[in-house]
Image: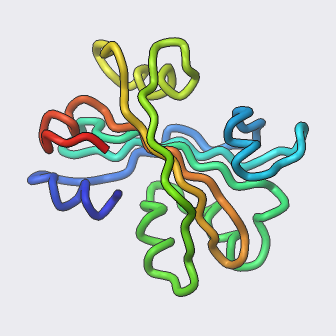
Amino acid sequence: MTKRVIGACDGRFRVRLLSQSWGQPLLSERRGLAMAARERALVRQVLLLCDEVPWVYARTIIPASHLHGKTRRLGRLKERPLGAVLFASRGVHHGEMEVARLLAGHRLYSAAAAQLATSPPALWGRRRLYSYGGKTLLVNEIFLPPLMEMTGERP
């Protein structure tokens, strides 16, 4: 996704770190990662910006038990794009992509819409599991209206 956003952005691209902390994943995230009910994870939330306009809200979940060895470096990305690290590495595998239309009231909708001046009726998003260094992580990407308008695409 990062590469596509950079390609579509005629201006300056950057990642803005919103938060990164230990927390409880959403139920659907926990199920996707086969995590135990009380297992903690590193939750990283970022915006992909074009000329300081938010185009994508992304939320990455890495189970605490997976943050060792090669995977530890993913906990130190700060404002570097996750995609750049994942796809520069050998042996990265990804699962099937899930696409969803998110409505007001969904926690991912709320987190993404909080970055906008006005909230649209719905947002499109996708998520995918990745295997990096033999460990699994989950990446949610929510496409914000400026990106959708710029590309004229659906996910």
Near-viewer residue (35 or 23): 35
Near-viewer residue (102 or 13): 102
Q: Residue at x 35, y 41 (%)?
A: 56
- Residue 135: x and y, percent? 72, 70
Q: Quadrant of the C terminus?
A: top left
Near-viewer residue (116 or 80): 116
Q: Is residue 20 above or below residue 136?
A: above
- Residue 121: x and y, percent? 33, 13
Q: Quadrant of the N terminus?
A: bottom left
Q: Residue at x 50, y 72 (%)?
A: 86
Q: Is residue 88 above or below residue 4?
A: below
Q: Residue at x 56, y 74 (%)?
A: 93
Q: Is residue 7 above or below residue 57?
A: below
Q: Going by the image, does 78 lie left or right of 43?
A: left
Quadrant position of residue 128? bottom right
- Residue 72: x and y, percent? 70, 69
Quadrant position of residue 142? top left
Question: In the rendered view, how is the structure colored?
Answer: rainbow
Q: Residue at x 53, y 28 (%)?
A: 108
Q: Going by the image, does 95 lie left or right of 56?
A: right
Furthest residue in direction left, as rendered:
10
